[in-house]
Amino acid sequence: MQKEVVLEIENLTFGYSKEKLLYKEFSLSLRTGEIVTILGPSGSGKSTLFELIAGNLKPLSGTIKKEPFSQVFQDPYSSFHPTYTIQNQIEDVAGIDGLEALCAQMGVEPDLLQKKPHELSGGQLQRASILRALLMKPKLLLADEPTSALDNLIQLGVMKLLFRTLEGVGILRITHDRDLAKWCSDTIVELS
């Protein structure tokens, strides 16, 4: 079965100034079932790439073609409103068709969805963030350091959850953790 291309970046050039480019004729392709990791130190342009893909920044030249996408952010507390329940915030952006099955698959107790973000641990909230992103039915999942704030055991569990979603999704993830990148990536793109 042919895997669908969910992200195609061709000859991308971008910089906050024309004298200092972060990307010069950068190209990348991602298909369903693949994890491509962008690896690099702070300030190398990892998050800027996600901003370009999301359309929040415009390239100086080049093209970005993408299928419907959703994002998982590094800090789950900043990606949820503090005064609404998790379920309210999921329903604001996604349908809840398949919610129960996905909760079971991801180890999220359904009663956690009735709580507010501050009532959950970091690991629970990050799993809720992934749950919300997957319920949006993306073809492309942008994961910005989705496990960096978690302890090693929870980090492993969250990555295994992401692996289970790969059949119909391509994952582009950001990390500065070389070992994690080697362990879970089909392709690593290293920025300096």
Image (spheres, grey):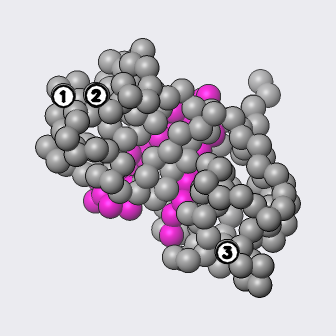
Q: Position of residue 157 (x, y in %)?
A: 35, 45
Residue sitting at 31 percent across and 44 percent down? 80
The magenta segment is 147-176
In percent of width and height, residue 82 lies at: 22, 45
Decide: few, some or many residues near mark 2? Use Cα within 10 Å; few <14, some 14-19, many ≥20.
some
User: Where does label 1 land, which residue?
Assistant: 114
Look at label 2 and name its amino acid: Gln
**Residue for point 28% across, 28% down:** 87
Q: Secondary structure at mark 2?
A: helix
User: In which quarter of the view is residue 100 placed?
Assistant: top left
The quadrant in which the C terminus is found is bottom right
Contact between marks 1 and 2 (CB within 8 A): the answer is yes
| Residue appearing at x 46%, y 36% in the figure | 133
Q: Horizontal placement of 83 versus 171: left or right? A: left
Q: Is residue 152 one of those drawn in magenta?
A: yes
Q: Disc 1 to disc 3, how far (Cα)?
A: 42 Å
Q: Nearer the viewer, residue 76 or 104?
A: 76
Q: Which residue type carries mark 1?
A: Gln
Q: Is residue 113 visible?
A: yes
